[in-house]
Image (cartoon, helix red, strand yellow):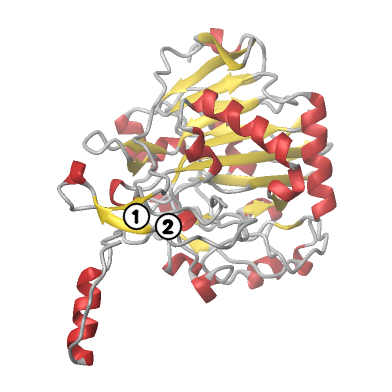
Amino acid sequence: MATCYLHISCTLLLILLLICLPTMTSTEEDACADNNCVLFGDDALAVPNKAAWKYTDNENNAEDKTNVGLDKNTAQNQDTIVIAHGNIGYSSSVSPSSDNDVIRDRTVKGNDQTSGKVAKVSNAYEFPPLTRIDPGTVGQRVDVELEDGRFFTRITRAVGPPIFEIPKFLSDEECDHIIESAKNNGLNVSNLFGAEIQDELNSDIPLAEISRVSEQTWLQRSHLGEDFLNRLHKRLARLTELDIGTIRRSEHVQVVSYVPGGHYHAHLDSIDRYDRPCCFQERCDDKALTPQWADCCRLCRYITVLYYLNDAEEGGETAFPLADASDATLAEKFENLEEQEWYNLSYYCYNSSLVVKPVRGTAIMWYNHLKDEQTGYLGKADQRSQHGGCDLIKGSKWIANNWISSPSSEDRFKPSHFYTES
C-alpha cells in the first residue's frame, strides 16, 4: 500500500491524505406450441384510465414479520417511486445486509491496464466484462450443460431483450426447499420504494390499481444452506455464462408469494440512471431500508432469473408488454404516458407481446440492461424488459428471483456487501 509520510501542518496533512486515497468512482407460434406462453401483436394499445403511473419494488422490513396477506390496512413500512412522465422505468429494492458484514482492508495500487485511471484493489475480486447470450430466433431450442453430464433446454421466447425459458431448471425438491425456507423466515407485505403510499393502501381504490400486491422475504446462505446455494450458483453461472464470482456477489434470493388478486404491474427490475453508486456495492448507512434509500444508490441488475416454485391454478402469468416491440411502438407506449395504462396488468395482461404461464421448476431469464460496447460493462437499462405479474385468479403462486448485478467499469474493483471473502 502506498503510504504518505506527512510531517507538516494539519491543513496540508488533510490535503495530501485526500490525494493519496484510491479513486474508486463510481413471435412465432412455434415458440408457444407447448401452451406455456402466448404471444400477441406488439401494436396492441392499452385503454387509458385514471390509475397512477407507479413503478414499485420490494424491500423487506427485517424487523416486521407480520403475515399481512392482502389486508391493505395492515401494510406497514411502504415505500414507492412515482414516475413522472418522461422519467420512466424506475423500480427499486435492496435486500437485507449480507451474512458477513465485515469487508476486510485491501491494498490499493495503480492498474497498468488503465494507465492508473482506475484504482485496483490487490487481492480483491475484479468484476469481469459482461457476457451476453445470442438469443438466435424466437422458438429456438438449445441444450446447455448446466451440471456435469446433465443438460437443460434453453428456449428463446424473445430477442429484444433476450428472454429465455428453461423448463425443469429446479427440481420439485428444490422448489419445496425454497418455499419452506421462505415460510420459516417469515414473509412481509411487499413494500414499495421511494415515497409514502399508506394513504393509497388505506383508501377505497380498486385493488387492481395498486401497483403491487404480494408478500415476500429474502433468503441468505444461512437460510438456504451452503450446499444448496453453491449448487444453484454454479448452475446460474453456466446458464448466464458469467463468472461465478459475479453470481456470488449479487443480491440474496428473493421469494414472493401471491394469493388471488395478487399482481405486480409492469416495471423494470433495474434503474436507468447513473448519478448514484450501485446498491449492491453501497451500504447507505442510515438511509438503507428507508424511503430516502433511493437518494443513496441505484439498482444495477444486469440479469433477472425468475423461478416458478409451483403451478399456479389460474392466472399469475408473467407478462412482457414491450418484448420485441419496434422502436416506433416503444416510442408510442411512452408518449403521453399519463393517458395510457398498458402497464396495468390487472386490466391488460393479455395485451402484452409475451405472456408466460407459471410452471413449477421453470426458470425465466432476461436482460434488464444493454451491454456497454465500449467498456464491456453495464450499459443503459432496456425499456423492452418491462415486465410484471398478472392477476392470480385461483390458487396460490410462489416465485423466487435471482438478480445478477454488475457495476460500471470504474467500479469493477469495488466489493459487494452481499459477499466477502473470509
- Above or below 204: residue 134: above
Disc sitting over residue 98 in the figure: none
Q: Is residue 13 above or below residue 355?
A: below
Q: CA distance from mark 2 to mark 1?
A: 7 Å
| Quadrant showing the N terminus | bottom left
Place of residue 169 in the rendered image (x, y in percent of width and height, measured from the top left): 67, 23
Q: Can you identify the residue that label 1 sits on?
A: 273
- Amino acid bearing label 1: Arg
Most foreground residue, 48 or 231: 231
Q: Secondary structure at mark 1?
A: loop
Q: Which residue is mark 2?
A: 298
Residue drawn at x 74%, y 66% is 75
**Quadrant location of residue 357?**
top right
Q: Residue at x 43, y 48 (%)?
A: 300
Q: Position of residue 285 (x, y in %)?
A: 51, 73
Tell me the amino acid under the disc marked 2.
Arg
Observer able to see residue 31: yes
Residue sitting nearer the eye, 303 or 106: 106
Left or right: 117 with respect to 231? Answer: left
Visible in this render: residue 259? no
The residue positioned 50% from the left and 68% from the top of the image is 293
- The vertical placement of 192 against 372, above or below, is below
Query: Circle 2: is it few (<14), some (14-19), or many (20+) Cα within 10 Å?
Result: many
